[in-house]
Image: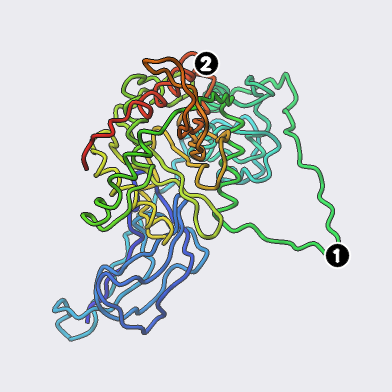
Amino acid sequence: MALVELVMPKMGESIMEATILSWLKKPGDKIEQDESVLEVATDKVDTEVPSTHAGVLKEILAKEGEVVQVGKPIAVIATESEAVQPDGKEKPVQQPEIKKVEAKESIQEPAPVLQSNGSSHPADFKSASRFYSPLVKNIAKEENIALAELEAIPGTGQEGRVTKKDIMAYLENRKLGKAIQVTAPAYKSPQPAPVSISGGDEIIQMDRMRKMIAERMVDSKRISPHVTSFVEADVSNIVYWRNKVKNDFQNRFGESLTFTPIFVEALVNAIKDFPMINIQVDGDRIIRKKEINIGMAVALPTGNLIVPVIKNADQYNITGLAKIVNDLANRARENKLKPDELTGGTYTLTNVGSFGNVMGTPIIVQPQVGIMATGAIQKKPAVVETPYGDAIVVRHKMFLSHSYDHRVVDGALGGSFVRRVADYLEKFDINRTV
């Protein structure tokens, strides 16, 4: 027998840690290679971790609820192997070498500018009295700035917010051992009104995903000044075309053809025409993204929402988009998405029409600068031009709602973009094949 360590796997470029949700196996259980051993949660998705070896689960090293860094051991598996000691004993698990570092008396670090009540841990923002952007939060975590220390930094941003410039200036002064003159009191963010609870009320505890969604939605509204533009599009062509080809598509590919891939294709074409919609904001820099990655909002059976991403959406034809849309939506509802499939979006689509809504004002998925909602398709009387004069006919109409970040997208660009999406939908070729 040989002992091997099961480590926390890397589940995405930006994911450095995960929380142990539950162990699916207990010590002494036999496990097969690639069999799921535990469930973990990242800030993107819940997923199962498979075993890298076949054998017996000998020891669990990380308890449920524990946050573990990627690459750290979480369990020990006893495997069948020729790698045994000459005396026949099990090969011990190699422990990482710990090097002792002796303190040098000759080096004196300058005292920090503000006291952090003895804590060397990064800030916990749940009890923060004011809003901090994701960039400032990341800097605070990297530099191990405790919340009390961060709260004392005067902010020059709107409503007293701490900007990147503020926190970087503070860090520079702290390195030099200089004190910061606090010239303005810290801004106190509004607190929610107290809720009264009577005997007949039901209290429902938010699950982890709902808490995460709530925090991100509030952050997005604070970060981006939202503006929404609306256009009503005549989508009769796509309705007629889909009705004509959907049965053939089902027979050939074994899956349904929805409107979503058609909407995604129109978005991609419009983004190519207006590339300054496909951007992100980094402080005072605008990052124009090379890839066109379309996120699509999917409602889950639990009532929560998740946004898988179609990477390089501009490289698919309508059939390819239909297949990837169905695959991502199905696996999202079955909780089988990989963390990487929830990252890297550059623009997002949400279909509020699937709930019978005619329009909406969606909230931007940070750090993107735009999101589009497609409403319910309705039959309406419309005036059309004919060689014999105007006539009233029944057409299929749909509202498009485009919410955009007014820091970097003005009304001309935001309005022109949604109009261009409508143009592509209205001019859809009904003679296309799949």
**Badge 2 element:** helix
Tell me: 82 left or right of 261.
Answer: left
- Choose between 129 and 368: the one closer to the eye: 368
User: Is residue 176 something one can see in this rendering?
Assistant: no
Residue drawn at 33 percent across, 30 percent down: 268
The percent coordinates of residue 217 (x first, y second) are 58, 40
Say what secondary structure mark 1 lies in.
loop
Q: Position of residue 374 (x, y in %)?
A: 48, 36
Q: CA distance from mark 2 to mark 1?
A: 49 Å
The answer to which of 312 and 42 lies nearer the viewer is: 312
Work out whether 309 lies above or below 45: above
30 vs 154: above or below: below
Q: Residue furthest front?
A: 388
Q: Amino acid at mark 1?
A: Gly
**Residue 424: which quarter of the image?**
top left
User: Which part of the image, by quadrant, shows the N terminus?
Assistant: bottom left
Mark 1 sits on what residue? 199
Image spot of residue 54 (x, y percent): 24, 76
2 vs 1, front mark: 2
Characterize the local packing of mark 1: few (<14), some (14-19) or many (20 or more) Cα atoms within 10 angstroms: few
Answer left or right for 312 relative to 239. Answer: left
Determine the image quadrant of residue 52. Answer: bottom left
Where residue 159 sits: x, y (%)? 69, 23
Residue at 27% x, 33% y: name it: 314
For marks 2 and 1, the one nearer the N-term is 1
Task: Find disc 2 in the rendering and name its residue.
Answer: 411
Q: Is residue 228 visible?
A: yes
Up the image or down, 31 lies above or below 230; here it is below
212 vs 270, nearest the viewer: 270
Quarter containing the C terminus: top left
**Residue type beneath disc 2:** Gly
Residue at 34% from the left image edge and 52% from the top image edge: 326
